[in-house]
Structure formats: structure tokens, C-alpha cells
Amino acid sequence: MELYYLKHAKEKIESHTVWETFLIKFVMKNKDTLMKKETQGRGQLTQRVQEAAKRLLGREITVRELRLMPYVQYLMVNEQKLDIEKINQEEREILSYWRKNGYLYGGVGERMEITREFWNILCEIIWLAYVDID
């Protein structure tokens, strides 16, 4: 990121407005951070996703739990029945945990239901992990 202000900042500070001076100093002070661009792949359990999970669920989540969330969202939008053939034992345990905590009801062989609160939590976490990425 080659900014004119970075090259000639010291000489030009006197001729700039207060706002421009602030921006120049800010960029000079934070240029290393500003130039680093962290990339996030789809479905990665990043610190930002974990922070959202802690805020919304009160705990950290696993990668498997993160990857199960879009499937549950898909089920709720479509057939609303869980296909036992499409989930493994670890995912069954996660679903069981969610049921015990009152997030969802039903599942295999019956209509699955989800609370509005948990739906919103899923949407927020899915947004951060799968949609709002660099």
C-alpha cells in the first residue's frame, strides 16, 4: 500500500487540515496493521467466530459444531426432518446437547423444531463464518 502521505508525511503535516493530519499520523502509526490483511476461508473457526459463540451461547464451539450449523439451517428451511444417514456420532452428540439445552426439538423420524433465539444465533454465526469473509 503505497500512500503519498507515507512518503512525504513529515514535510506535509504543516500544510494539511487537522483531519488530514490526524489521518496521516494514524496511518503512520498503524501502517503495519493496516497493511496486513488476514484472510478467512469459508467455514473456518476463527477468533471472531469464537467470540460470537461465547457472546451468544456462553461457550466456545468446535469446528464440527460450526459445520453442523448450516446443515441444521438447511433442514429447517426445507424438509425439517433429520436424515440419520447424513450425520455422524459426534454430530448426534451435538444435536443431543442442543436438545438438552432447549435449542431444538424433534429430529429423526419427526418434524424438527428450533427456537427463534437459536435460529438467530445460528444465522449470526453462519454469517460470520461463511458469508462475511475476506
Image (tube, grey):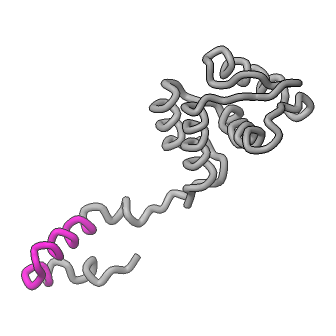
Q: Quadrant of the C terminus?
A: bottom right
Q: What residue appears at the point 19 percent right and 78 percent down from the top-left corner? A: 9
In the figure, residue 65 lies in which quadrant?
top right
In the figure, residue 17 lies in which quadrant?
bottom left
Q: What residue appears at the point 55 percent right and 38 percent down from the top-left corner? A: 120
Left or right: 113 in relation to 116: right
Queried whether the magenta region covers residue 98, the answer comes back as no
Residue 49 drawn above or below residue 28: above
Tag count: 0
Q: Give the residues drawn in magenta, as a range.
A: 12-28
Residue 16 drawn above or below residue 36: below
Left or right: 70 in relation to 31: right
Q: Nearer the viewer, residue 15 or 95?
A: 95
Queried whether the magenta region covers residue 18, the answer comes back as yes
Q: Position of residue 33 (x, y in %)?
A: 37, 59
Q: Nearer the viewer, residue 80 or 129?
A: 80
Left or right: 125 in relation to 34: right
Q: Quadrant of the N terminus?
A: bottom left
Q: What residue appears at the point 55 percent right and 48 percent down from the top-left corner? A: 128
Q: Nearer the viewer, residue 104 or 22?
A: 104
**Mainly helix, strand or loop, the magenta region?**
helix
Q: Position of residue 24 (x, y in %)?
A: 21, 72
Left or right: 9 in relation to 83: left
In the figure, residue 86 lies in which quadrant?
top right
Outermost right residue: 85
Q: What residue appears at the point 57 percent right and 41 percent down from the top-left corner? A: 125
Q: Position of residue 106 (x, y in %)?
A: 77, 22
